[in-house]
Amino acid sequence: MADKKKVRLIYNIIMTGFVLYAWLIMFFNTEEGMLTARGLINLKFYTTLSNIFAAVVAVIWIIDHLRKKDNPSIALWKLMSAAAVGVTFTVVIGFLGPLYGFGTMYVGSNFFLHLVVPVMAMAEFIIFNERKMSVKDNLFVILPPLVYGTVYVINTLINGVKGNDIYGFLIWGYPIGILIFIVICFAAFMIGLVLLFINSKLINKKGNGLTEKT
């Protein structure tokens, strides 16, 4: 168990380092591909925010581990952040990659933010989570894309679609754009369910896994 904790500690440090490295690349350099912006303006991207969210949760886990503190809620935050970057991974694979080309989606910082960190975050939850969680817990994974989508639509209503529809979700109009966000929220929920299901299978021998009650 101690060795597993050490591995997870190193894992979280590396994942946090990847996010920081990728964000600094984006912060100082925009000559690397699509959906990048120099400076703090890159915080307008869901990809950036979801990866930073995963890094912040990783840092919280690291601090709790070093303080030998048992924080029951960290498992839920890990699930939320894994699903959040899982949405980034899925949207790139299923929508942005085919639309703009996979070559531009996995260049420079995007390689880490669209692929490496999402895979690492999802894999970490599957492999290391040992807390019994419920389907009701999974409802929380909808919050990150829901909040982002709401702010996204409100911003375009106030400031106009041009220059603010950064992902092109509204090029077919608001009804289709809102439908896309609903689908993304549903995708987040399904990603969370898959993570919970696989995790429960891996730790079933220890009496943990997906249940209807925590």
Image (spheres, rainbow, N blue to C red):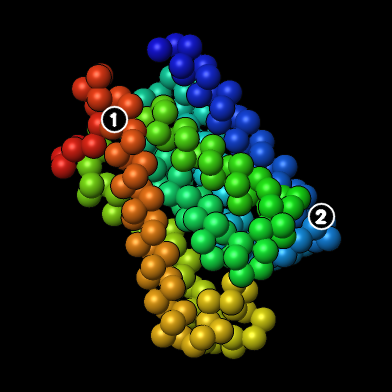
Residue at left 40%, top 12%?
A: 1
Q: Is residue 21 left or right of residue 114?
A: right
In the drawing, does residue 123 fall left or right of residue 20? Answer: left
Residue 194 position, x and y percent, is 34, 45
Disc 1 designates what residue?
Answer: 201
Instruction: Tell me which corner region of the image, top left, top right, bottom left or bottom right, holds residue 188.
Output: bottom left
Residue 88 visible in the displayed image: no
- How crowded pointer 2 is (Cα within 10 Å; few <14, some 14-19, many 20+) is rated as few
* Secondary element type, mark 1: helix
Amino acid on which the number 1 mark rests in the picture: Lys
Q: Amino acid at mark 2?
A: Phe
Determine which of the numbered discs, if any, sits on residue 28 in the image. Answer: 2
Quick one: quadrant of the C terminus? top left
Place of residue 173 in the rendered image (x, y in percent of width and height, measured from the top left): 49, 88
Name the residue located 68 percent from the left edge and 48 percent from the top edge: 111
Q: Is residue 129 above or below residue 33?
A: above
For residue 179, side relative to residue 201 (left or right): right
Please name whichever residue, 118 or 98, is drawn nearer the observer in this view of the structure: 98
